[in-house]
């Protein structure tokens, strides 16, 4: 096999390499750290793995026992021939376009977009039909990287790890790391027989199984390759190999995995979702994960000006439990009006009728006459008079079984011709112009009429494999999810400077597209659980802490120790208060007020900082044992804060936190009620905890 190095493109501290198989005209893309020498192709017994992974209906499926496990490297891939590569550098961006043509009249272009100074690259693929006949896609990836690791000779025995992030409701973001041998990704004796670990999520909650995150680690050379997907519906990632070169790819969940096919008519073009890629040497997995998450910085910095100081949210849901009223909101406002909070969110239930529960009443969105007998305007004015920005809750995707909207079946999604129905919910057809007009009136009309400046958009069910569409169930889901995203973009256009919160049963939509479209996201529904700090710390790997809204639900019977434990958890992201705030003692409020003050002082570090993890691996989230320390260092390296949570089990005599840098750190402030002893010994912080299930927070300076 004759292989040529086609092009090397410099992308900051990364390099993109393109290798051409001169016989098949396939091109493989590698990413390497910029300081490293270009690797020799001959290090491995490997074939070119195409940077365009596509499968067309009617073409032969891949062999080597791929059926049911992978659609990669099919006849459709081998029908594409490299055409050209262009490198365009303008407007502070470098774009690399690699073009492939199929003699039947199809053209595929892989775009790589790098913003100057960025640590990540965007990748997406355009597939164009220039033939006189329709063509149907069964699979199209957004990216594909091959030849991993190019710095290890042979198959990389006991050298390569696969890192993923799992997620379930209420326990989001659990890191999972496996050796490739454990996933049976070693090549066979014959360098034949496809090995594939294809994983992802199917449905309209894109982080309901895994986060769209994949990292490969070369443990011998301390190099990480990573990818994320910006897509709010079914997606997949794949770790694949046939020979000694490992490949990774990802994009839309394909026909086998996500019931997706898409027909492209003559003259049409289809564009894949964006992928976010990066590579780095000499770091840790946690540091590299934050490097991937840094792709969101520009988007959030372009958000509402009032968001840049990270105001505190009050959400009344865990105070009223879906029964907000003018009366109870006034009482809450009286308790919190002088606490320095920024937003007051009226959560679900403001539209209830009688004794019906809120979670079957979404869709009609008529203000409850029982809860707000004088209408909502008086309540909103009271929120403003208390010095807070008013917010309101909506679900734009679903309707509840107790609403009149539930029976508007002509405007609801179908599957197999039957209205798509889960236990208590149905789903708007967001490609129906009538539905857009309806939601425009209900959502945007209400925001404008009452002057809401904060909008919480929730989504409390998933439609699963998809809905009826001429192309496929998966394509129906993709188009509906895209319309949901576009509706949010329309809200922002019509109501400039509105703060939008992304919520889906807590943290079930924490993928880059929805995170980038909103100011902040609900991190989880673990509102009153002891595992809050563990989940909150997990999410530093996949989102910016400044966008991670963490709840502090305070109860009247909470001890002062418990209040510190709860408040300290919110220092790992955006503080959101709720609970029995009208029934708290002065001592309880004193501890809360001190926590609020500390949060405001560390807000610049939450906004622009870097996170370090300490402590043993937490095995059970529901039966917590051990401890966790999260150190976040400010951008200038001179200020930091530390949050330590001590769980159950053996109470250690001392906890050690290694502080970065050689300069001596000093303790500026301590937030604790247990009497724990903390001191700095050279470059180490030593904490001697007094009690289990406690928290100690510190502000540090040097």
Image (cartoon, helix red, strand yellow):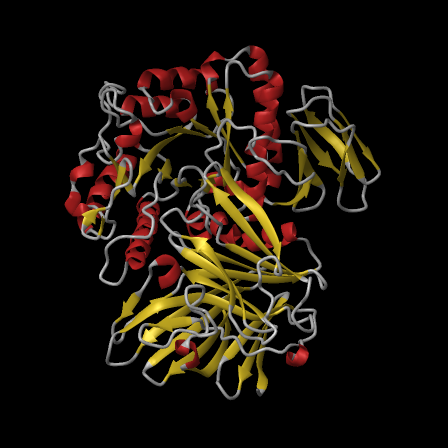
- Look at 46% across and 70% down and name the residue there: 65
Quarter of the figure that contains the C terminus: top right
Residue extending farthest to the right is 682
> How many dots with numbers?
0
Q: Where is residue 350 shown, x and y percent of the image?
A: 29, 26
In the displayed structure, 629 sits above or below 9; it is: above
Quarter of the figure that contains the N terminus: bottom right
- Look at 35% across and 21% down and name the residue there: 382
Q: Where is residue 275 shown, x and y percent of the image?
A: 47, 61
- Look at 51% across and 88% down and name the residue there: 23
Foreground residue among 34 and 600: 34
In the displayed structure, 547 sits above or below 65; it is: above
In the displayed structure, 376 sits above or below 502; it is: above
536 sits to left or right of 423? right
Foreground residue among 580 and 95: 580
Q: Where is residue 594 shown, x and y percent of the image?
A: 61, 22
222 sits to left or right of 465? right
- Look at 37% across and 62% down and name the residue there: 256
Residue extending farthest to the front is 189
Residue 594 visible at all: no
Foreground residue among 390 and 294: 294
| Among the 4 quarters of the image, the one containing residue 699 | top right
Q: Where is residue 416 shown, x and y percent of the image?
A: 21, 53
Residue 602 visible at all: yes
| Among the 4 quarters of the image, the one containing residue 79 | bottom left
| Among the 4 quarters of the image, the one containing residue 592 | top right
Foreground residue among 216 and 347: 216
């Amino acid at each position: 096999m004759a292989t040529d190095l086609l092009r090397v493109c410099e992308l900051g501290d990364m390099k993109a390499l393109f290798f051409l198989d001169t016989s098949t005209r396939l091109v493989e893309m590698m990413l390497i750290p910029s300081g490293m020498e270009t690797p020799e192709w001959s290090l491995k017994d490997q074939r070119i793995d195409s940077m365009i992974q596509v499968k067309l209906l009617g073409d032969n499926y891949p062999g080597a026992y791929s059926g049911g496990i992978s659609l990669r490297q099919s006849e459709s891939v081998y029908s594409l021939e490299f055409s050209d590569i262009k490198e365009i550098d303008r407007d502070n961006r470098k774009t690399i376009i690699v073009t492939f043509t199929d003699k039947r009249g199809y053209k595929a272009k892989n775009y790589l977009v790098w913003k100057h100074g960025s640590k990540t690259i965007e990748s997406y693929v355009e597939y164009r039909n220039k033939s006189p006949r329709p063509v149907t896609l069964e699979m199209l990836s957004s990216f594909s990287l091959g030849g991993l690791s190019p710095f290890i000779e042979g198959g990389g025995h006991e050298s390569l790890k696969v890192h993923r992030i799992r997620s379930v409701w209420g326990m989001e973001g659990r890191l999972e790391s496996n050796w490739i041998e454990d996933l049976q990704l070693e090549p066979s004796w014959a360098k034949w027989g496809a090995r594939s670990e294809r994983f992802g999520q199917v449905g309209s909650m894109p982080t309901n199984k895994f986060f769209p995150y994949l990292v490969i680690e070369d443990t011998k050379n301390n190099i990480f390759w990573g990818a994320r997907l910006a897509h709010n519906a079914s997606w997949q990632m794949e770790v694949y190999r046939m020979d000694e070169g490992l490949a990774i790819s990802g994009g839309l969940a394909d026909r086998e995995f996500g019931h997706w096919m898409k027909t492209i008519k003559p003259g049409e073009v289809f564009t894949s979702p964006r992928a976010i890629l990066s590579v780095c040497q000499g770091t840790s997995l946690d540091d590299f994960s934050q490097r991937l998450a840094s792709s969101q910085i520009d988007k959030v910095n372009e958000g509402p000006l009032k968001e840049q100081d990270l105001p505190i949210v009050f959400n009344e849901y865990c105070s009223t439990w879906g029964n907000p009223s003018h009366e109870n909101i006034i009482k809450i406002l009286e308790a919190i009006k002088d606490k320095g909070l920024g937003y007051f969110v009226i959560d679900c239930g403001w539209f209830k009728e009688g004794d019906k529960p809120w979670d079957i009443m979404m869709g009609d969105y008529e203000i409850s006459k029982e809860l707000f007998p004088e209408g909502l305007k008086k309540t909103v004015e009271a929120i403003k008079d208390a010095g807070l920005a008013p917010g309101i809750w909506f679900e734009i995707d679903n309707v509840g079984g107790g609403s009149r909207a539930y029976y508007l079946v002509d405007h609801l999604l179908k599957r197999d011709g039957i209205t798509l129905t889960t236990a208590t919910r149905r789903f708007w057809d967001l490609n129906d112009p009538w539905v857009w007009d309806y939601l425009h009136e209900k959502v945007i009309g209400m925001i404008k009429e009452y002057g809401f400046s904060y909008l919480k958009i929730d989504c409390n069910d998933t439609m699963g494999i998809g809905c009826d569409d001429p192309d496929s169930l998966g394509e129906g889901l993709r188009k509906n999810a895209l319309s949901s995203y576009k509706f949010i973009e329309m809200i922002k256009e019509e109501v400039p400077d509105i703060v939008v919160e992304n919520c889906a049963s807590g943290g079930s939509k924490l993928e880059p597209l929805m995170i980038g479209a909103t100011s902040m996201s609900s991190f989880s529904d673990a509102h009153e659980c002891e595992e809050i700090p563990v989940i909150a710390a997990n999410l530093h790997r996949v989102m910016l802490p400044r966008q991670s809204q963490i709840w502090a639900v305070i109860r009247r019977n909470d001890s002062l120790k418990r209040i510190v434990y709860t408040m300290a958890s919110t220092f790992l992201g955006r503080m959101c208060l709720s609970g029995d705030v009208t029934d708290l003692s002065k001592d309880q409020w004193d501890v809360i007020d001190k926590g609020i003050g500390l949060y405001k002082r560390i807000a610049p570090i939450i906004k622009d900082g870097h996170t370090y993890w300490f402590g043993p691996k937490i095995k059970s989230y529901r039966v917590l044992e051990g401890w966790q320390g999260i150190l976040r260092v400010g951008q200038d390296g001179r200020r930091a804060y530390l949050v330590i949570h001590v769980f159950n089990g053996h109470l250690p005599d001392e906890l050690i936190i290694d502080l970065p840098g050689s300069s001596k750190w000093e303790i500026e402030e301590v937030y604790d009620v247990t009497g724990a002893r903390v001191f700095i010994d050279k470059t180490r912080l030593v904490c001697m905890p007094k009690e289990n299930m406690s928290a100690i927070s510190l502000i540090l300076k040097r």
